């Protein structure tokens, strides 16, 4: 007999979750960052801003047009990029644009830390992007502890990324800063995702939330 409650809902395989996670990170983080870096080198900062924004809004329009579930991660990326671009256009100061990622990371870290004091840590609100989350699954004690620990993890990652961004902005040239920031953002996203998946997979297996490795795939 196991501790996990019986649940007749079909559960996805770990491979399917990993593919979905990779696609979400690719759409919302990696491609916009690479577009910005590339367009900055072949054009200027305004072309880079336009390219990254076009990608984000195009990806959102594609999801709406194909009736796919809205991606919270993509919406957050688009909202942050829009706010930074509008502010840069209003002030005509692109230095502020490059400083804002540090402020954004700091704000996200604070939001994540504050959410730890409530009933729903921030990661629990994003979990639906990567797993078919139900109220029953979200209410399980081990799942709730997982959400708490992952929220703390991402808060710490955002704080560290904010500090490194400020340091790079003060010490590196603009070209070096953009390249290093792109690598930093991508590296943090991949490392954080790897730790998140490892911890989540461990809990999911113990709770019976993953399909057996060799189970038949439902139609």
Image (cartoon, rainbow, N blue to C red):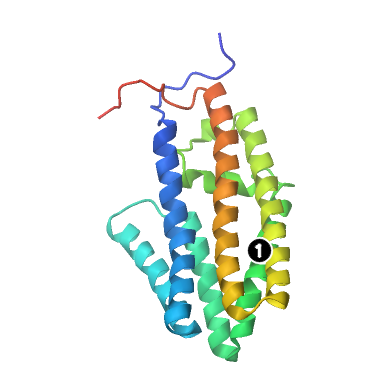
The extreme top residue here reads 1
Q: Nearer the viewer, residue 98 or 150?
A: 98
Q: Nearer the viewer, residue 33 or 50?
A: 33
Residue 203 spot, x, y in % from top left:
58, 28
Q: Residue 147 falls in which quadrant of the image? A: top right
Residue shown at 29%/27% (left/top)?
218
Identify whether 190 is placed above or below 46.
above
Identify whether 23 is placed above or below 173.
above
Residue shown at 34%/65% (left/top)?
61
Let me know if residue 125 appears in the view.
no
Q: Residue 159 falls in which quadrant of the image? A: bottom right
Residue 148 spot, x, y in % from top left:
68, 41
Looking at the image, residue 168 sits to the left or right of residue 58; the answer is right
Residue 181 spot, x, y in % from top left:
59, 67
Residue 18 spot, x, y in % from top left:
44, 40
Residue shown at 67%/53% (left/top)?
157
Q: Please, what secondary structure does the residue beneath circle 1 have?
A: helix
Q: Which residue is mark 1?
A: 105
Let me know if residue 162 appears in the view.
yes
Q: Residue 39 falls in which quadrant of the image? A: bottom left
């Amino acid at each position: 007999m196991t501790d996990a409650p019986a649940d007749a809902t079909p559960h996805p395989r770990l491979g399917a979750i990993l593919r979905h996670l990779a696609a979400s990170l690719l759409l919302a983080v990696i491609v916009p960052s690479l577009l910005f870096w590339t367009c900055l080198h072949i054009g200027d900062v305004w072309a880079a801003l336009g390219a990254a924004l076009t990608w984000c809004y195009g990806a959102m329009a594609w999801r709406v047009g194909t009736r796919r579930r809205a991606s919270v991660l993509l919406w957050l990326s688009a909202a942050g990029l829009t706010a930074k671009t509008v502010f840069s256009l209003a002030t005509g100061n692109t230095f502020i644009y490059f400083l804002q990622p540090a402020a954004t990371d700091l704000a996200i870290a604070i939001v994540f830390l504050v959410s730890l004091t409530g009933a729903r840590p921030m990661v629990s609100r994003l979990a639906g992007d990567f797993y078919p989350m139900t109220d029953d699954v979200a209410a399980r004690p081990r799942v709730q502890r997982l959400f708490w620990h992952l929220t703390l993890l991402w808060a710490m990652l955002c704080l560290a990324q904010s500090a490194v961004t400020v340091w790079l902005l003060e010490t590196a040239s603009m070209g070096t800063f953009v390249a290093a920031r792109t690598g930093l953002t991508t590296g943090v996203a991949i490392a954080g995702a790897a730790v998140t998946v490892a911890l989540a997979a461990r809990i999911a297996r113990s709770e019976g939330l993953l399909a057996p490795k060799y189970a038949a795939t439902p139609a």
